[in-house]
Amino acid sequence: MTAPLCYRLSPNGLSLFVRVTPNAGRDAIEGVEIRDDGTAVLRLRVSAVPDKGKANAAVVALVAKALDVPKSAVSVTSGGTARLKTLDVVGDGAALAALLGGLG
């Protein structure tokens, strides 16, 4: 049995499922976490506070840097005010997935 993935390939790139801890001591990608319901999420920590989109902007910057894409290629598509978010990353989905494999 294969482990669940924290992303889904799409025609324009991929959708990335993340769990964000804002107001952390540092910005970091902690790896893939399997949740109680069996789904996988990429755990992120950002030092920004969850106020007026600051944490979301930090998440976008962190993911863009890790995947070597411009910040404009990453957008929060759901969960804007929640810890669990879905990000869309525009680019070559297979190449982005390979980079994600190295992070988790």
Image (cartoon, rainbow, N blue to C red):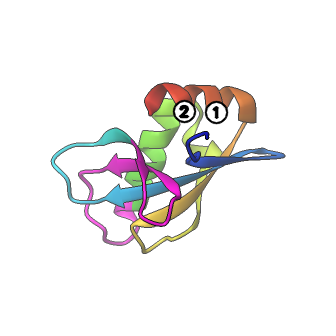
Residue most extreme to the left: 25
What residue sits 28% from the left and 60% below the top? 22
Residue 50 forms part of the magenta stretch: yes
User: Residue 29 location, x and y as percent?
Assistant: 36, 39
Say whether residue 51 is left or right of residue 60.
Answer: left
Helix, strand or loop at label 1? It is helix
Inter-mark Cα distance, 1 to 2: 5 Å
Q: Amino acid at mark 2?
A: Leu
Which residue corresponds to mark 2? 100
Say whether residue 36 is magenta.
yes
Task: Identify residue for label 1.
Answer: 97
Q: Which residues are magenta?
A: 32-55
Does residue 92 show up?
Answer: no
Between 56 and 87, the one nearer to me in the picture: 87
Which class describes the residues within 10 Å of circle 2: few (<14), some (14-19), or many (20+)?
Answer: many
Residue at 30% over, 40% down:
28
Quadrant where the N terminus is found in the figure = top right
Residue at the far front: name it: 1
Position of residue 51 relative to residue 23, above or below, is below
Q: Give neighbour class at mark 1: few <14, some 14-19, many 20+ (Cα, 10 Å).
A: many
